Image (cartoon, rainbow, N blue to C red):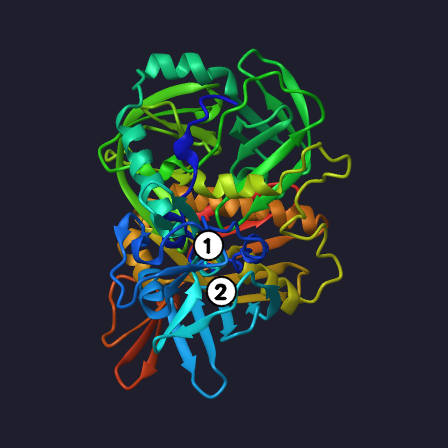
Amino acid sequence: MKKKLSYTLLTPLLAAGLLLSPLGAPQHAAAATSPVKFAATAKASAISVYVDDKKLSVSKAPYTKNGVTFVPMRELFKALNASVTWEEKAQTIIIRKDYTSITLTIGNKVALINGKSVKLDAAPEIKNNTTFVPARFVAESLGGTVKWDNAKQAVRITTEEYEYEKEFEQLQEELKNRPKYTPQQIVDMYDDSVVTITTNLGLGSGVVIGDRYVLTNYHVMQDASSATVITVNNKQIKVSGVVTYSQNNDLAIIQTDQSIGSTPVEVGYSSLNVNKGDKVVAIGSPLGLQNTVSDGLVSNIIYEGSTRYIQTSAPIDHGSSGGALFDEYGELIGITSAGYTSQADLNFAVSTVYAAMLMEDLPKVPSAKVKFLDPTLPDTLVGQSEDKIAALLKEQFGVFSTEQGEAKLSNWKVTRDSQGWLVITTDMDPVFYTYYGGQNKEGLRTWAINLATELHRMLPGDKIQFQIYYDRIFGFEPRGFDANEVKALGNDKWEVRFPILDMQFKDQLYINMKD
């Protein structure tokens, strides 16, 4: 793997902000069952306790007994950010922190950690009206580490949070000292690591992350039944299938049937360090022009749903999907996934954070049973009712995506007329059409042709007519429309309805769009 840096570790603070999902309970019980005893020679009056390098202020002095150091309960738990409940009648202490619960009983050498019994070297005890607990056992059970400082006769406790904070500070220092690379140097490092992916439906790009693994977009592989990886040296390798994927994050990892022979790129969490204004380099195959390089800036960091995207001014185009976005430190920070045709260079890449998590599901040895994704659409609609065909079309084609947003298509109807034609109609959001219809005429034509291709595949023997309508009710009688496009509803209401698009096909395709 290339350039593996220590800062690819994701701190829990960052992970919590990103993932928003609970972690499992810490497994500290085993470490707490066999504590190392402190020096028995320490004098109680000389013992100090430090928590995260801060001296603990205590009402009663800590002391040692049979090699175990005891610390006043409440001061210790407060310093450890743990809550404590004292049950007087049962002489029981209940400590809670995050996902850990500890139950101690005065005079009892058996404790409970998350309901499991653990044997203690020394039981909690009450001395001079103060409850004392064994310091090492409690601290380690809550995930901390404990050391005995013999020179200063001190117990030094370090919490997990403090360790993470120190690691994060060190990470920031490492980030400041990283070398920067020019676009030419990044190309020298990674040009052979980016590949073109051709499928039976289209083309895209991919990033080599293993001897036989390539990272790409989910939508590149969606509905594909075959695919080929083409390296920058024009080596062509068949794809065996999709190993793992995340549709929500638009990522997929594919497996080839033989070694790719390219240098794998390290995938980590460095995209969390990206800021607006940072320089980036994109490598992909826009319009099939293999391993085209472009550079730009990070324009923004945005979220679509729960997915983090890096917006960049580095130009990309159709075929760039699945390509690599590197920062100026040579780190893979995104998988290029979408772009708008605009003078503003509005392009987007999925954060590699999700790719790093996806890689946790990769088998160490490529599987012989890998397959392609299940198709979105069925193989055939022959014999299906008109209602089922309408429901499928609404689910799969109910939204037309544009640079200005999504145009919803509603009121899907499928009928068969007296001449045997299958007639499909739907209504476009009239407000969207009013404002943006003219700007998206060619995009709508392409979308409709794709729909016709799928319908012809699923219903090869049918004559099909597909129409998209504009349908809106006005509080005045609109002028300039054909008589059959305006209908009086009464009460000063008029309905305007006309076809935006009319498409007919069987062995050939005819398409007409309203000017």
Q: Which residue occupies the extreme bottom position in the image?
A: 89
* Image location (x, y in percent) of residue 340: 34, 39
Q: Is residue 358 left or right of residue 184?
A: right
- In x, y percent, where is residue 301? 30, 44
Q: Are marks 1 and 2 in contact (CB under 8 Å)?
A: yes
Residue 89 position, x and y percent, is 47, 88
Q: CA distance from mark 1 to mark 2?
A: 9 Å
Residue 132 visible in the picture? yes
Q: Inspect the image, locate mark 1, and give the three-letter code of the amino acid beneath it.
A: Gly
- Report which quarter residue 184 is drawn in: top left
Q: Which residue is mark 1?
A: 143
Local packing at callout 1 (Cα closer than 10 Å; few below 14, some 14-19, many 20+) is many
Residue drawn at (50%, 72%), measured in percent from left and top?
104
* Lateral position of residue 412 relative to residue 495, left or right: right
Q: Choose between 441 and 104: the one closer to the eye.
A: 104
Q: Check disc 1 and report its element: helix, strand or loop.
A: loop
Up-down relation of residue 348 to residue 265 (above or below): below
Q: For the image shown, how many numbered marks are present on the structure?
A: 2
In front: 462, or 170? Answer: 170
Give whichever of discs 1 and 2 has the lower sequence position. Answer: 2
The residue singled out by tag 2 in the image is: 100
Residue at (37% x, 45% y) in the render: 163
